[in-house]
Image (tube, rainbow, N blue to C red):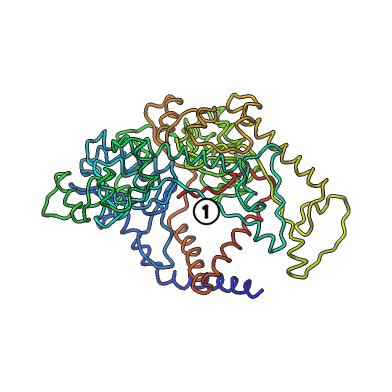
Amino acid sequence: MRQFFKFMFASMLGTLLVGIVLIFIFIGSLVAMIGSSVSSDGKEVTIKDGSVLHLKLDEEIVDRGPKDRLDIDLGPFSAESKTGLNTVLAALEHAKTDDHIEGVFLDIGSIPTGFATLTEIRNKLNEFREESGKPVIAYSDQYGQGAYYVATAADGIYVQPKGDLMYHGLQSEQMFYKGLFQKLGVEMQFIRGSNNKFKSFGEVYTEDHMSEANKMQIHAILDGLWSEHLNGVSTRRGISRERLNTIADSLLVRNAAAAAALGMVDGLKFRDEVLDLLKERMGLDAKKDVRLVDVHKYSRSFKAGKPRNTTTKDKLAVIYAEGSIVNGKSGDGTIGGASLSETIRKARKDSTIKAIVLRVNSPGGSGLASDVIWREVKLATEVKPVVVSMGNVAASGGYYISAPATKIYADPTTITGSIGVFGIIPNMKGFFNDKLGITFDGTKTHRFADMMTVTRPLDPEEKHIIQGYIDEFYDGFKQRVAEGRNMTVEQVDSVGQGRVWTGVEAKRIGLVDELGGLEDAIAAAAELAGLEDHRTVELPEQKEFFQKFLEDLSGNAKGWVATEMLGEDAELLLQYKRAAEARKQTGIMARMPFDLIIR
C-alpha cells in the first residue's frame, strides 16, 4: 500500500509540474517552433551551396517521423525525439539531385532500430552514392555492428584512433519469470494452439529456460540476419564471408588499429581530420567550416511525396501500422483496431486515392482487433491495389492484417510469420491467500459465470473450453492466410504453428511475394494502379505539433518525477503501468512469441 501511494503521489506531482512549467515555456516554445521551421523572412528553410547532408541516426528510428519537431532542450520536460525512416529516405532521395548538397556525412555509432530499417537506410545510401556520384563518408568514435553495417555503404569508413568497432556476431537472450511467480504464489496458465509449439510467448512465465522449438527458431532467425549482414559487408569491403566469420568468432577486432589492419575501416582519424577529408572529397573551401545540414532541417526544405512539376490529383496513400495491435483507438506506439480500420476505409472510399501501401511494423496483439483490420484490408483490395510493406517485424497479428493484400513486400531481415494464437490467464489464489492473507467467496447463477476469474485455477473442463476457443481462432487464422496467399490450409499449417521466419525464408515458403523496402512497395503499388504521375500522402493524419508536444511533455515529466522520487523503484511504476495496459486487452492474442532483443 505504501508503494501505491508513492506511485500515486509521483504521478500527481508530475502532472502538476507539467502545468507550471508549461506556463513559462508556452511562448518560448512557439517562438522556437516557428524559428525551427521557417527562416526569419517567413520562407521555408533554404539550403545554401556547398552543404553536406548530416546523418547522425542517434535517435530511435520509427517508420514515420513526427509531423513537426521542436529542437529545443527542456531537460526532463523535453518532448521525446524520434527520427522517421520516411524522413531519411525522402531526404536522401531529394539530395541525389539537389545541387546544394555535395555529399553525405554518416556520423554514427549505435543506431537504435531493427535490422530491416538498417537495411533500408543502407540500400538507400548505396543508391544515393551510385546514382548521384556524390561521396558518402562514415565516421564514428565506436561502431556498433548495426552502425557498421550501414557504414559499409560509404565510400570511406573512418574511426577515432582510440575508438573501437564491435564485431562479435549476434546474440539473443530472454528473461524467464517462472521462479519469480512461484515465489509470489502466482500460476500463469498459458494455453496455445494445440500444435503451436513455436508460439512460445507464455513460456517466459511458465518455464525457466527456452524450449527446444523456441531455441531452434530463434537460432534460425539469428543465422538469417547474420547471413544478410555478411553479404552486405563482404560485397562492399572485399572480405570473404568466411574471413568475416573468423574475425567475429575469434574477436580479432579488439581496437581501432585492428579494424584498420583487417581492412574493416579505411583509416584512423580524429573528427577534425575527417572534416578536412570531407572538404577535399567534396570540393569544398578548405578554409571554411563544413556546412552540415541536419536531416530534419533538410527535410523542411522540400515537400516530400510530391513529384516536381506535377499538377495531378491522383494520390497513392501510405498507411502506417506500427506498434502492438489493440482494441479500440490507436495510441502512442499502438495500432487501434477501430482507428486503423477507419483510416483504411476512408482511403478505400476516396476516389482520388488510386492505390494503398500498408506499412506494417507490428508483433501483433489482440486477435479480435486484427480481424477487424483484416476485414478493411480485404475490402480495399476489391477496389484498388493494396501492397503491404513489412518493416522490422510483421508477425502474428501483424501478418494477419497483411495476408489479404494484393502483394506483400518484406525486407530480407524482416521477422514475420508467427501464424498462431495463445491466451494467458493468471491464477493468483496462492498470492492472495498465502502472501496477503486475502480469501474470496461468492455465488453465481451459472456454471461458467466465473470462468475467467484470477482468484482460482481453471478446472479441466474450463481449460478444455478455452483450448477450443484458441484452436478455433487458429483455424480461422489459417483460413485467412490460405485465402490471401492462394495456399491450402494444410500448407499454411505446415509453415504456421507459431513459427517466425526471416523475410528471405518467408518468400521461399510463400508468405511474401517480393523482397524489398518501403520504396519498392510504393513503386509496385503505383505500377499496379497504372500511375505514371501521382502524389504520395501519408495516413493516418498526425496530431498537430503542439498537441503532440504537450502529450510528450506530460509523459516525460511524470517519468522524470518518478525517477527522482522513487529511484530504483521507478521501474516498479513502469511495470505497474504496463500491467494496467495489458489488463485492458481481452480475448485471444495473436502476438509474436517473444520480444526479440538482439545484441
Q: Where is residue 434 in the image (x, y as percent from the top left)?
A: 76, 67
Element type where label 1 sits in the image: loop
Nearest the eye: 287 or 269: 269
Q: Position of residue 257 (x, y in %)?
A: 25, 51
Please state, as top left, top right, bottom left or bottom right, where the N terminus lies in the image: bottom right
Q: Position of residue 387 (x, y in %)?
A: 49, 32
User: How many numbered dots are placed on residues in this image?
Assistant: 1
Q: Residue furthest front?
A: 250
176 on left or right of 23 = right
Q: Residue at x 56, y 32 (%)?
A: 380
Nearest the eye: 225 or 444: 225
Q: Residue at x 66, y 41 (%)?
A: 421
Nearest the eye: 536 or 121: 121
Name the residue type under label 1: Asp
129 on left or right of 408 = left
Nearest the eye: 130 or 493: 493
Q: Is residue 385 visible?
A: no
Q: Is residue 440 visible?
A: yes
Q: Which residue is drawn at 41% across and 37% down?
A: 228
Q: What is the quadrant of residue 581 in the picture?
A: bottom right
Q: Which residue is drawn at 58% across and 66% down?
A: 572
In the rendered image, which residue does mark 1 sit on?
A: 332
Q: Residues within 10 Å of mark 1 (few under 14, many from 20)?
A: few
Q: Is residue 314 above or below residue 82?
A: above
324 on left or right of 148 = right
Q: Position of residue 306 (x, y in %)?
A: 35, 38
